[in-house]
Image (cartoon, helix red, strand yellow):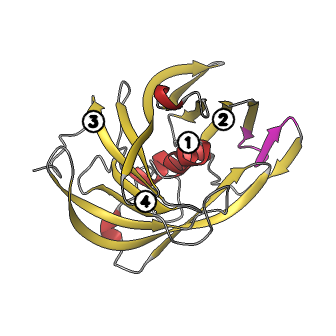
């Protein structure tokens, strides 16, 4: 479950930059937005409701600075807590001027395992500070949650099928050079109806039950919101599917749905 939740986080959002500058051309979210997903697991061809994940956005202050506060929370289905209980919370604080991460927090409780960590990003020195030390990072580095918002704000009209969109992410005291493979456009059926979507395959870090490579597929709404509608991926045993089940206060009308 914890790896499935991390999977959603890694692929929920992104912010568009103008070429190599820090000029934001489009912001796909607004404060008070809330998006909820159901996580399904299949091992013999039948999907079971294994858990849920919710993402919210708000305005706040970090010291004297105005920031966006994005929170992702994941939990196992209560009926399966006796097998393995998960209650995870991930947070990021984004600069309102350019949407780069200022601070990242991870607070996870998974069975008997718990972990709390913070990362502070220093834009002047291009460093990430954790309890384990100070690490040099690229100028435009992302954390796990800010990476979500980065994906949502990419202007996909600038790309053609087969293109790869590169980015850097700091996770576990390491910098990863990753990319998103733009596959094209596709119509999919969901509980809400049909969606016009943009189909993507991210390069995945080898983590737990997930193998590295482009085995994951993500469909985001083909409109100004670019919210993930569905994520599918094989795992070491079986497969998972993550579906959008609820949304509130989107910045734009969800025109991809019909």
Depth check, front residue: 236 or 13: 236
Q: Nearer the viewer, mark 4 or mark 2?
A: 4
Query: Cα distance, mark 3 to mark 2?
Result: 24 Å
- Residue farthest toward the front in the current orientation of the protein: 44
Q: Residues within 10 Å of mark 1 (few under 14, many from 20)?
A: many
Q: Earlier in the sequence, mark 3 or mark 1?
A: 1
Q: Residue at x 43, y 78 (%)?
A: 163
Query: Cα distance, mark 1 to mark 4?
Result: 32 Å
Q: Position of residue 231 (x, y in %)?
A: 40, 55
> Is residue 72 visible in this depiction of the protein?
no
Q: Residues within 10 Å of mark 4 (few under 14, many from 20)?
A: few
Q: Residues within 10 Å of mark 2 (few under 14, many from 20)?
A: many
Splitting the image into 4 quarters, where does residue 32 fall?
Answer: top left
Query: Cα distance, mark 4 to mark 2?
Result: 37 Å
Query: Cα distance, mark 2 to mark 1?
Result: 8 Å
Q: Position of residue 141 (x, y in %)?
A: 65, 53
Secondary structure at numbered mark 1: helix
Magenta span covers which residues?
121-131
């Amino acid at each position: 479950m914890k790896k499935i939740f991390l999977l959603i986080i890694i692929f929920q959002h992104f912010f568009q930059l103008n070429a190599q500058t820090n000029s934001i051309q489009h912001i796909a979210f607004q404060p008070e937005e809330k998006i909820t997903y159901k996580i399904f697991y299949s091992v013999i061809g039948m999907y079971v409701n294994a858990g849920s994940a919710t993402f919210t956005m708000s305005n706040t202050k970090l010291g004297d600075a105005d920031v966006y506060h994005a929170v992702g929370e994941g939990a196992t289905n209560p009926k399966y807590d006796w097998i393995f209980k998960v209650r995870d919370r991930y947070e990021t604080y984004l600069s309102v001027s350019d949407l780069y991460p200022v601070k990242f927090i991870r607070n996870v409780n998974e069975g008997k395992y718990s972990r709390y960590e913070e990362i502070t990003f220093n834009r002047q020195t291009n460093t990430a500070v954790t309890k384990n030390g100070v690490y040099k990072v690229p100028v435009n580095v992302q954390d796990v949650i800010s990476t979500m918002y980065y994906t949502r704000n990419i202007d996909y009209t600038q790309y053609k099928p087969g293109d790869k969109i590169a980015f850097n992410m700091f996770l576990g005291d390491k910098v990863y050079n990753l990319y998103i493979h733009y596959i094209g456009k596709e119509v999919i059926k969901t509980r809400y109806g049909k969606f016009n979507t943009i189909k993507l395959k991210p390069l995945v870090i080898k983590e737990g039950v997930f193998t590295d490579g482009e085995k994951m597929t993500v469909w985001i709404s083909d409109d100004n919101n670019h919210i993930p509608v569905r994520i599918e991926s094989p795992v070491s045993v079986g497969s998972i599917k993550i579906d959008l089940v609820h949304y509130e206060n989107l910045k734009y009308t969800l025109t991809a749905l019909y």
